[in-house]
Structures are given as structure tokens and as C-alpha cells.
Image (tube, rainbow, N blue to C red):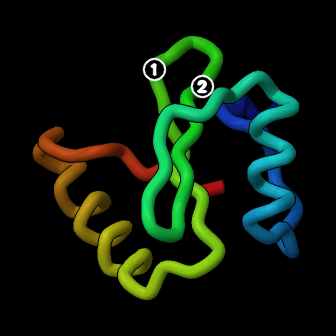
Amino acid sequence: MERRDHPALPADADHIDAERVFAAAGWTPCGTGDWAIALRSPDGRRAVRISPFDPTGPYTAELYRRGRIRDVVTVIIDA
């Protein structure tokens, strides 16, 4: 059985679906920005950023993935 530290989302989920699924799993609001929200996991150890539009998202994710090698940045969890 696959272990998940976050709720599973359908492949066709949009930002509204994502917020609903995470909130139903007990994740709570912890930040808002120009076009994104952040939710904190029930144990407070993780956060998710949800955005309907993020032109820099793929670049930011790649920087986080590369930095993970050195344990200096946020860890990306691919859903």
C-alpha cells in the first residue's frame, strides 16, 4: 500500500478541488498571496501552496528539487 503524507488528488483536479480535498483532510489556512493560498498540514510539519495560475511554478519547483540534494530548501512532494 502506498504511503501518503498528503491527500490524493485526481489527475484532473483544479485549484478549487485541491483546496477542498486538503481542507477535508484537516489542512488549515496559513497564508495567502496575490494568486495563491497556503495550507498547513494537521501535524504542522508540511505546507501546500495552491494556485490557479503560476507562471513561475515549474521553475520554482525545479529549484526546490535541485536544492533538495543539499537539504537547503523546501522539499517538493509530487502528487
Q: Which mark is residue 45?
A: 1
The quadrant the N terminus occupies is top right
- Mark 2 element type: loop
Rendered view: 69 above or below 35: above
Q: Residues within 10 Å of mark 2 (few under 14, many from 20)?
A: many
Is 12 left or right of 75, judged from the image as shown? right
Q: Residues within 10 Å of mark 1 (few under 14, many from 20)?
A: few
Q: Residue at x 87, y 74 (%)?
A: 12
Residue at which label 2 appears: 41
Q: Amino acid at mark 2?
A: Ser
- In the image, residue 5 lies at what x, y percent? 64, 30
Q: Nearer the viewer, residue 8 or 49?
A: 49
Q: Residue at x 79, y 70 (%)?
A: 14
Q: Amino acid at mark 1?
A: Arg
- Mark 1 element type: loop
Q: Residue at x 68, y 28 (%)?
A: 27
Mark 2 touching mark 1, by CB under 8 A?
yes
Is 26 left or right of 62, judged from the image as shown? right
